[in-house]
Image: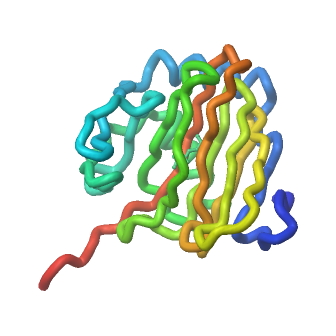
Amino acid sequence: MGLSVQQRLPPDQLALWPAVMTAGEAQALFEQLLLELRWTQPELTVFGKSHPIPRRQSWVGDPEAHYTYSSQAFSPGPWHPLLKDLAVQLSGFFGQPFNSVLANHYRDGQDHMGWHSDDEPELGPVIAMLSLGAERELAFRPRGGGPSFKVSLPSGSLLLMGPGLQQQWQHGLPSRAKVADGRISLTFRQVRALNIGH
Ligand SMILES: O=C(O)CCC(=O)C(=O)O
């Protein structure tokens, strides 16, 4: 069973499983994916200026799982077999056809992710996120304004972000100067073909 991590949110919108694998398994997976995924650091344009994103990422999945983020189109690379296995297991567990994974690599506490919602029209309503490596906090704030809260994500934990969450909340991973170790988050997603035109 998932644990509700925030009393204001129902557990089908936000739930945390603190240990879906042992610390040793999580560390071994972290090290293997660090070596074997093709990591990139794309540039994003903010107010007309290009900056490399403050982390690395790798997007893998079924070939048709094209995805647009901050006006940039991403095409998935081929599945890593371990990620495909996890996607199949998580799809069965949550009853969601996850067909892609955005992996994020935070090299140390300086790497981060700004406030955003994963509410692009092609994205399915559920994101399942596995955390590996350094424990970091994911912050949530209501889109309409109001107090924020944080959820600690230990290595080997699984976070469910369920239907409606992205429409009501933003999330982000703040930098943490004291964290020296790396972290990988694996965000399992469903990318649906968009019916554009006729
Ligand atoms: O790495 C994290 O904890 C956050 C990832 C995230 O927000 C995203 O991939 O949209």
Residue 181 position in % (x across, y down):
67, 16
Residue 129, compared with residue 121, is above or below; it is above
Q: Is residue 132 left or right of residue 189?
A: right
What is the count of numbered marks?
0
Looking at the image, residue 55 sits to the left or right of residue 2; the answer is left
Extreme residue in the bottom direction: 198
Image-quadrant location for residue 182: top right
The quarter of the displayed image where residue 46 is located: top left
Q: Position of residue 7 (x, y in %)?
A: 87, 67
Residue 167 lies in quadrant? bottom right
- For ligand 1, which image quadrant applies? top right
Percent of width and height locating residue 30: 61, 23
Q: Residue at x 74, y 35 (%)?
A: 156
Q: Residue at x 68, y 45 (%)?
A: 138
Residue at (62, 31) in percent of width and height: 175
Question: In this rendering, would 167 be left or right of 18?
Answer: left
In the image shown, does 138 or 163 lie closer to the viewer? 138
Q: Residue furthest front?
A: 47
Q: Residue at x 68, y 56 (%)?
A: 140
163 or 111, which lies in front? 111
Q: In the picture, which quadrant includes the C terminus? A: bottom left
- Foreground pick, 192 / 118: 118
Above or below, 15 relative to 29 = below
Query: Of residues 47 and 111, which is closer to you in this image?
Result: 47
Using the rendered image of the protein, determine whether residue 91 is visible from the camera's viewpoint.
no
Horizontal side of 48 relative to 15 (left or right) equals left
Task: Give residue 126's position: percent from left, percent from top.
Answer: 57, 65
The answer to whether one can see residue 30 in this image is yes
Asked if 106 appears above or below 47 in the picture, the reply is above
State the scheme by which the image is colored.
rainbow
Rendered-image quadrant of the N terminus: bottom right
